[in-house]
Image (spheres, grey):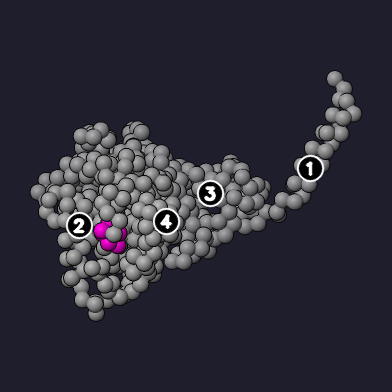
Amino acid sequence: MALSRSARLAALATATASLCLIAASPAPSPGSAGIGDPYFPQLGNGGFDALHYGLDIAYDPGSGRLDGRTTLTARATQNLSSFDLDLQKLDVTSVEVNGRRARFTRSGDEMRITPGDALRKGRTFTAEVVYGGVPQALSGPIVFGSDYGWMKTSDGVFVACEPNAASTWFPSSDHPSDKATFDITLKAPEGLTGVSNGRLVSTRTQGTSTVAHWRESKPMATYLATASIGKFDVRTGRTPGGTPIYVAIDPVLAHSNAVDVYAVTAEATDYWSKLFGPYPFEETGAVVDDMPQAGFSLETQSKPSYSAVRDESTIVHELAHQWFGDSVSVKQWKDIWLNEGFATYAQWLWAEHRGTRSAHDAFLAGYNSRPGTSSFWQTEVADPQRDTMFASAVYQRGAMTLQALRERIGDKAFFRLLPAWAKAHRYGNADTAQFTALAEKISGQHLGDLFDKWLYTTGRPALDQ
């Protein structure tokens, strides 16, 4: 059928407009090597938004060797000629982008990938990296002077990566502002159990190995991903409130009388669900390993990781993080008090719930035990600096800030604020200014003086009379 003259003119105009848009489109350029976080400028990567990671991990506890294949699905946020991923020390065998071999270079912890064809802004692409080697844990002053990341144990591995160690075991955009969903498949010698985030999709035997496939269907920061492998006694079920629960405990620790990890996890999950809003993930639980040299626990998403059997207060702290830190994550690491101050305050709320001590008394005990000359008061909680981002003030003074806020605005507004905060930024990222704004909106009060005094000013604040 022949087109009319007007139809031909319209088609010509559309084609001309399309050519003009293409001509006006910026030329492809490299994505930045980091997102510019003040504490970790090279962490994360510019030019794309990570959407999903498919991790296939095979681990040999005897040699400590990991062989991995990571498939990243991402969306380009600019016209990309190349892009970076974060990867530490492991050797890369090959890289493919959209199923075609791509060139790559390494410089320190950065891997720059150059696809055969430029990636257009707004388009989704895949990048597959095959790699291997013996992962190395990180060390330094950041995490209480302890090693962290991929940590070898006597029968497997304990994985706890906050803040910058996910790239010790898989290539990623390793910053909490770039969250994604995950499928994690762990292959280990038969007799060992691989535990990861989300829910267990399948377990199968492959020769003399066991392969476990885990799926985290909610967005997750890379540092919250885990791949703990070892001998575990596993207990599954549901909390009284109906949330699926999976608890894995090293047999060496399984009969410890310190605390019933399963029972406390179930009870705390349900209690926080009433106080903070619906539990944000498909499953709750715990991974308890015999790794005392680590000396810390981490709120790995859906299943906090404990390097030994911890007390009840620690368990409720890590579970509170599922709302504050995991579901609602920081935009930049300087806002870490939004994670740790909130989880510490949850410990005070738990004691209040148990009837052992009020949050007000916990506040006064912390305040009165530290004189004005104490170095504790010299940390600016809203920007504690990289090497002291886990200083006790971030935890304790952060919690004090919340108690001071509660006493200013009253219980009714305060206990509306906590679930409203968790709901407003569910599965996303937020910062201190947004929390301040929401607190003022819900309370109807100007609160700048309170937050200035407790978060932005060094020195021991005077108590309101």
Residue located beneath label 1 in the image: 17
Q: CA distance from mark 1 to mark 2?
A: 64 Å
For the N terminus, give its image quadrant: top right
Q: Is residue 13 above or below residue 319?
A: above
Q: Is residue 40 above or below residue 412?
A: below
Q: Amino acid at mark 1?
A: Ala
**Helix, strand or loop for disc 3:** strand
Q: CA distance from mark 3 to mark 4?
A: 27 Å
Whether 445 is among the magenta residues is no
Residue 451, percent from left and from top: 36, 64
**Viewer-proximal residue, 193 or 222?**
222
Residue located beneath label 3 in the image: 49
Are dots 1 and 2 in contact, CB under 8 Å?
Answer: no
Are dots 4 and 1 in contact, CB under 8 Å?
Answer: no
> Mark 1 or mark 4, which is nearer the start of the sequence?
1
Q: CA distance from mark 4 to mark 2?
A: 24 Å
Q: Amino acid at mark 3?
A: Asp
Horizontally, residue 91 falls left or right of residue 4, namely: left
Horizontally, residue 114 falls left or right of residue 445, namely: right
For discs 1 and 2, the disc positioned in front in the rendered view: 2
Main secondary structure type of the part rendered in magenta: helix
For discs 3 and 2, the disc positioned in front in the rendered view: 2
For discs 4 and 1, the disc positioned in front in the rendered view: 4
Which of the 4 image quarters holds residue 148? bottom left
For discs 4 and 2, the disc positioned in front in the rendered view: 4
**What is the magenta range?**
401-407
Q: Amino acid at mark 4?
A: Ala
Task: Classify mark 3: residues with Cα within 10 Å, few (<14), some (14-19) or many (20+).
Answer: many
Q: Amino acid at mark 2?
A: Ala
